[in-house]
Image (cartoon, rainbow, N blue to C red):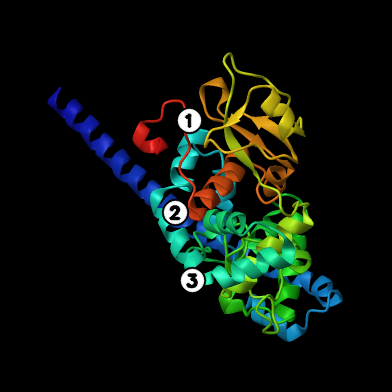
Amino acid sequence: MARSVTSKKLRCAVLAVLGLAATEAALAVAAPVPARAAAARTVDFDAFVRSLWPEARAHGVSRATFDAAFLGVTPDPAVIEKTRSQAEFRKTVGEYLDTAVSEKRIALGKEKYATFSRWLAKAEDRFGVDRYIIMGVWGLETKYGTYTGNDYVIRSLATLAHAGYRGAYFRTELIKALVILQEGHVDPAHMMGSWAGAMGQTQFMPSNFKPYAVDFENHGRRDIWTSVPDAVGSTANFLRKHGWIPGETWGYEVVLPGGGMASPPDHYVPFATWADRGLRRADGGEMPRQGRAALLRPAGAAGPAFLVTPNFKVIKSYNNATSYALGVCLLGDRIAGWGPLKGRWPGATVAQTR
């Protein structure tokens, strides 16, 4: 009996050793696979880059510019990962504005305005866009140029285009980015932006650069990366070309008559009509005698209400989100010296609202 148990133990031990050896052998074979896969992806990426050359050349890009743009460029796995994780936590309008129009951002905006007020006034004069709306866009996009993104735009766009993300869109953006390099507006070392290719202090995609970026500083190039005047002028040009109405407000916070009121989205009627219906400005000011506005209640009946003009919709051409556009407007108003909202967002504390 004792010998039988011993034999079983011996067999189990032998099998365990053999199993361990087999596992180690399997691991030894499997270990190089990720490395081989990475090498294969690199070869595939290199072939993709080579395939771009005829198209780039057809758009006027020289071989020297092309090679310099792609020198040492490899796919960026972090970019691909970000395409898979965009379903992030969705903030309420109140939560978003608590960050977008924070006291810290307002204070920094006032400092930046004081420094660049001459250029902001010049942009308003030339393009007709409210200088404080320009400040609001600049503040939300890149915190007034203090954070423009740490990704090399060519690498990000090449990674997305190679992966086939969003069809041909990013391949087209990549070619346009190469043209920007060819024209000498920026060099590869400074062509930085977001993981999705939005560039500089304006966060323009390359396709937005040619129609909207301007050499506002008159220094021979359109530098939305390091030139605040160019960034300010380019933002104003973008908004004007998207339909900004000079001399018209974005809108006002309003107080509704008892019982509230409903209105179809983008249903613009004269300000005077809204006044006749019992609406009044929350800050106590008079309603404009001219112009049209629509009623906006972004948090429903429980939150603040606004009358917004077609200029509000123009701001959404920069980023098609109501919370973003409202953030731009309210941030600009605070930098201009207007007070905080009178109404409170659902669930917000007095401190958050004020």
Residue 294: % across, % down: 71, 32
When asked about the image quadrant of residue 293, the answer is: top right
From where the camera sits, is residue 191 visible? no
Q: In the image, what residue type sits under mark 2?
A: Ile
Quick check: 53 above or below 1?
below
Q: Residue at x 44, y 64 (%)?
A: 111
Residue under label 1, please give it. Answer: 343
How many residues crowd around disc 2 within 10 Å: few (fewer than 14), some, or many (20 or more)?
many
Q: Residue at x 51, y 64 (%)?
A: 113
Quarter of the figure that contains the N terminus: top left
Residue drawn at (38%, 37%) of the image: 352
Above or below, comparing residue 49 to residue 320 in the picture: below
148 relative to 19 in the view: left or right: right
Q: Where residue 115 is drawn, which disc sits there?
A: 3
User: Along the line of sight, which residue is nearer the eye, 188 or 205?
Assistant: 205
Label 2, on which residue?
Answer: 106
Tell me the kind of residue under disc 3.
Thr
